[in-house]
Amino acid sequence: MRPFCVTVPESVEEAVRVLAKWGPEAHVIAGGTDLLVEIKEDRRSPKVLVDISRLDELRQIRVECGVKAEAGAETGRECKRTDEGEGDVVWVGALATHAEVASSPVVRKAAPLLAEACAHVGSPQIRGRGTVGGNISTASPAGDVIPPLFALEASVDVEGPRGVRSVDVESFFVGPKRSALAPGEMVLGVRFRELGPNHVSFFRKLGQRRSLAISVVSVAFAARKVRPDAFDDVRIAFGAVAPTVVRARTVEKALCGKRLDPVMARQISRLAFRDVMPITDIRGSQAYRQEMACNLLYEGLLDLLSGSPAAGARGG
């Protein structure tokens, strides 16, 4: 392991200045659950680690009135909707840990599938140290947090030498462990509209063990329930089945407005074959991943049709 130095900035602006100065030889660290492993295995050799763990403004989980953030918003603050039929915007800071997101009343109400995904990340120790920003910045196609963000149609806020910009989540991930972060940029957090009172959702993950395992396949689902057996506004994302997390738009289109029974749900779930492009690796073969992607979606749909609380329904 090559020696490195650590700097602890007191502001985001200071962190950005250090990143811009050192370029690819600097790396942001917060929980360090992924980065430190890579450093120990000599897969990364940064000269400078920029420790942002003391930037408390990036630890907030808050509700924002309307599309734009309101300065000074507090975690969990209630605010009225600005547009009839549209939910408030939720902002989750990059330093929010998986444990904090999983237990957050704001997230559990607005996006239960994201809370559920964070509850499935690693061990209790990892959930207590690992952060949402770290999971996003690592850009692994198997990252548990990422499929729910796709299903929520989230955006990623980043800051760099040229200021702050927002990147829609599908454009942020460009390949395995590759993101749209420009030199000197860092992730500030993510924002998304809360699911409406008639929306239902679920997150399901398949690993080699029930816990402490990297995903072999995962699926995130969100939709509005228009009848007990029909949905619209369907959003489905699969993880660990392609170079990046993918939206299953073939399945989404087939599900919208369709009256479902178990047989129809099974048939539509099989369309996931058209959207996923898995590889074979030590955790699973291509054929196995394709089959399990279909099965995880089918099981989730069955729970929704049966009204099972395991489906992560919100409201109706």
Image (cartoon, helix red, strand yellow):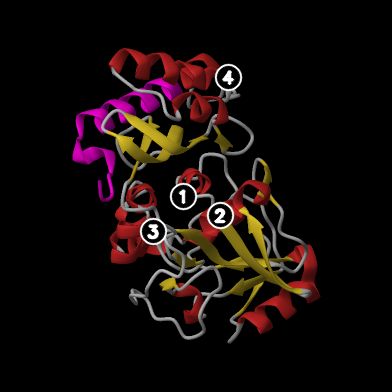
Horizontal arrangement in the rendering, residue 43 relative to residue 71 (left or right):
right
Report the disc number at residue 28: none
Determine the CA span between mark 1 and mark 2.
7 Å
Q: Earlier in the sequence, mark 3 or mark 4?
A: 3
Residue position for label 4: 274
Q: Residue at x 33, y 22 (%)?
A: 260
Report the disc number at residue 136: 2
Look at the numbered disc 4 and give the secondary structure of its residue: helix
Assess whether mark 4 and mark 3 are in contact (beta carbons under 8 angstroms): no
Q: Residue at x 58, y 87 (%)?
A: 10
Q: Earlier in the sequence, mark 4 or mark 2?
A: 2
221 above or below 86? above
Identity, as a three-letter code, of the amino acid under mark 3? His
Q: Earlier in the sequence, mark 1 or mark 3?
A: 3
Assess whether mark 3 and mark 1 are in contact (beta carbons under 8 angstroms): yes
Task: In this rendered view, identify the residue nearer to me: 194 or 12.
Answer: 194
Image quarter of residue 224: top left
Look at the image and give the residue range highlighted in magenta: 292-316
Q: Residues within 10 Å of mark 1 (few under 14, many from 20)?
A: many
Q: Earlier in the sequence, mark 1 or mark 2?
A: 2
Determine the CA span between mark 1 and mark 3.
9 Å
Assess whether mark 2 and mark 1 are in contact (beta carbons under 8 angstroms): yes
Image quarter of residue 163: bottom right
Identity, as a three-letter code, of the amino acid under mark 1? Val
Report the disc number at residue 145: 1
User: Does the magenta segment cover residue 241?
Assistant: no
Q: Residues within 10 Å of mark 2 (few under 14, many from 20)?
A: many
Identity, as a three-letter code, of the amino acid under mark 4? Arg
Q: Earlier in the sequence, mark 3 or mark 2?
A: 3
208 above or below 58? above
Horizontal arrangement in the rendering, residue 17 relative to residue 142 (left or right):
right
Look at the image and tell me in which quarter the N terminus lies. bottom right
